[in-house]
Each structure stands twice: as C-alpha cells, then as structure tokens.
Amino acid sequence: MTAEAFRAFIASGWAPRETTPAPRADVADRAAGRRAALAGRFPGERLVIPAGGLKVRSNDTDYPYRPHTAFAHLTGLGAAAEPDSVLVLDDGRATLYFRPLAPRDSSEFYADMRYGEFWVGPRPTIEEIESRYGIAAAHLDALPDALAKDADPARLRVVRSADPAVARLVDKLRVDGPAVLPGADDELDRHLSEMRLVKDEWEIGEMRAAIAATHRGFDAIIAALPEAIANGHGERWIEGIFGLHARHQGNGIGYDSICAAGDHANTIHWIRNTGEIRPDDLILIDAGVELDSLFTADITRTLPAGGRFSGPQREIYQAVLDAQEAGLAAVRPGHRFRDIHAAATRVIAERVHGWGLLPAGVTVDQTLDPESGGWHRRWMVHGTSHHLGMDVHDCGQLRREDYVGGELRPGMILTVEPGLYFKADDLLAPAEFRGIGVRIEDNVLVTEDGHENLSAAMPRTAADVEAWLSSASG
C-alpha cells in the first residue's frame, strides 16, 4: 500500500463530527471583563500572554499540562487550555491563537505522537473556542505574522516567563524598532498579578468549592490512617489517598502534597513522602484540591496518628493554634498584610520565651526586632501568610513592598499558617519537644467588616481534631 493510499484509508469511514455550537461557559463574560480591564490599563498596546508549552518529564513523555495562570485567568479556559496557545490583546481586541483540531486527512491526525488525535485525543475547533469562551480564535501558525503586522515594538509587551519561544519571537520584532520602555514586560507581569488580588463572587465560589473538596480529601485521609500505619510507606499511602480524591473532584492537586510524619514535619516543604507513620506520631498534612478552573485550596492540619495528642504534642499544638487565632484576628480591611505575621509571631515569640528557649537576657521585644532580633525564627522560619487563588502562592509577581506592605481589601483570599518545628537533633529544645512539628493553615476571605474563615468546617482545636479522628475510626 502506498503512503497516499494508507492516508486515504485512515481518513475514511468516520462518523461526522459534532457540529452543535458549544454552550457558553459561565466564566466567559467574567474573563471578557478581565481582558477589558487589562486593555484599559495599557491602551493602544499589543499584549502577548502565552499559555506555555509541554515540559518533558523523561525522553518522549511530558508532565501533565497546566497553562500559565495569567493566560487561564484572562481566557477562562482553565484546565481545558491547549499547550502552546497564545492570547493576544491588540488595542483591546482579543485573539486566541492555538493548535485546533486537525482534519482526519492530515498526517497529524494519526502520526503526531505529541499532538495527534490518535495519540492524545481531540482538541477543540476554532468554532468551539469562539462559541464557548467568546474569544476570536485563529490557528497558531498565524501568530508570527499577526505579531509582526504593523508592529510598534515600543508598544509590545509579553509575559516572558510563560513561553521562552514566544518571548524570543517578540524580541526579534524589537531589534530594529524604537527602544522598548525599560521594564515593560515586568510591568505587565506585575499588573497581571495585581488583577488577581481581589476576587469576584464567581472566583470566591470556586475557592469555596476547592476548599470543600479538600475537606473531603482530608476526611478520606483520616479514614485511611489505620491502613497507612499498618501497610507501611504510610506517608505515600495518604499522599495517594488525597491524590485520588483531588483527581476525582477536580483537576488534581494544587501543589505537591506534604504528608510528613514525625520528624519529617520539621522539614517545611517535605514532599518526598517516603516515611512510615507510627501510632505515636503527629502527621502534618499540607494539601489542596485544584479545580478545573485552576483555583486551589491550601490547607494544613496536624493530626495525632493514633487518635490522641500526647502532653508535649498538645502543648505545642495549642501554642500554634493561639498564634493562628492572633493572625486571624488581624485579617480585616485597612490592616496591612504584614500585620498578620506580626500578630502570629508575637505569640510564637512569647511562647518560646516562656519555655526558656531564647538566649539568656533576650526579651520578646528584642527577638521580634526586625533589625537585630530573630532568635525565635529557629523554631518558625517561614512567613505566616500568602495570597491564594489560581496559584497556591498567588499574585507572586508583585513588588515585595506592595505585597507585604499592601493593605487588606474585601475580596482578598489568603492563608494564615503559623507553625512550630522542633527537629529531633535540636539540642536547644526540651527533650520531650524534639521530633514534633506542628502547622495549622486555613484559607481566609477578607470581608467588609473583618474576615471569613472559608475552611472553618475543618476541625482545628486539639479536642475537635481528636473527635474528628475518633468519628472516622468509629
């Protein structure tokens, strides 16, 4: 059989494709409003926001694809975004360039292992994208000419980190043109982060759904704790349990789950999850479900694997809970983001001072002095809070002074997550504290008159946590 005959055979005998217009997505109008706001901030400019491409995991296999957050936010596509897509706003007119569904008489249909329908499934058509998301769409092959047409390099900006190949394409257009405003691309990046600081009602609803799904995932972990202890590789067992529920209820996990038993809890970002779980361990679980919209929860609970806190475990846990309560009380409009950390760490400093852990003569105020203090940070090295949304550490391109020094406004969603960490080999810690790590993290909405703890349904006090475990085992 000739190649032409084989191609004709492959292309024949298929049922007609569905041609009914795709229903308009709930998020489409909101995404259009975001694009209009962005265009109003950069009038008359051509803005290039790539989704990013596939990333190789090993040889000819790729990591699961996730689009760049700014692209997802401005298009509404979320997990449905296609690799290599690019959104272009040209003086407010939006066009989505992507690789659409290939015809069945093309070699791509059956022979392209990375993009072909035979290999990775169908992609949307241009008509489907336009119908569902309300964005004019075009084939990705048209992007270079579209960017070059009547290009004014001085009014061309790109999200550089999203796709280096697209950034290089933009840079070629800038070579012979007038000088580009210094920091033009960085300014675009910062503004895209700023746009996500305050969530609208739809976005808050997505966060509620992500948190509810995460709660169900934690319930499943607690129910599986006896198996995790008995079967070995306990940290991996509960990582798998949560991953199952995250994938079933949403797009997957919002970040690598931390499932840290015993002394592993004292490694802030323990994601190896290779340890055993013993009945007398605390297990620190930091995990979140990411929805198909890419909004993610980020919640931490520290659980006594055997169902009851020991005396030292309870003492440390209560100190962290008290610090979190102080941080939560600081979440209200008009306060600064840094006030949350200040309130929580004062409680931490007071507690470690009361335990006699600070150097002789060092007072609470001295250790809290930002210029010359910091002794308490041996046992709590991280910040107490971060913004949360489509990225687990959302709005991360803001300048530090605008982030840490920013004023809290209604609609912001952030975490409050103090901790205390006493490593097993820490000879400055009391012997009974060594090997105990505790963190408690909740997701909090700033409201008009204070805050709402969106994850408040998940037990937090030591007694309530013990009851949570008891109800699961019962």
Image: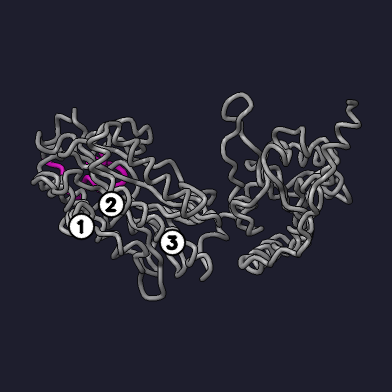
Q: Name the residue nearer the viewer: 96 or 185.
A: 96
Q: Given contact means CB atoms under 8 Å apart, are the residues at marks 3 and 2 in contact? A: no
Classed neighbour count for the residue bearing mark 2: other residues with Cα under 10 Å, few (<14), some (14–19), many (≥20)? many
- Look at mark 3 in the image and give the residue it sits on: 413
Residue topped by disc 2: 440
SS state under label 1? helix
- Quadrant, the C terminus: bottom left
* 183 horizontally vs 428: left or right: right
Q: Is residue 233 above or below residue 384?
A: above
Circle 1 residue: 471
Where is residue 384 drawn, in percent x and y? Answer: 33, 51
| Residue 120 belongs to magenta span | no
Start and end of the magenta stretch?
A: 361-378
Q: Is residue 322 visible?
A: no
Q: Amino acid at mark 3?
A: Ile
Is 368 above or below relative to 42? above
Q: Position of residue 251 (x, y in %)?
A: 52, 50
Which numbered marker is on residue 144? Answer: none
Sequence-wise first label, 1 or 2: 2
Residue most extreme to the bottom:
449
For disc 3, the neighbor class at 10 Å (few under 14, some 14 to 19, many from 20) is many
In what element is the residue under mark 2? Answer: loop
Quarter of the image for the N terminus: give it: top right
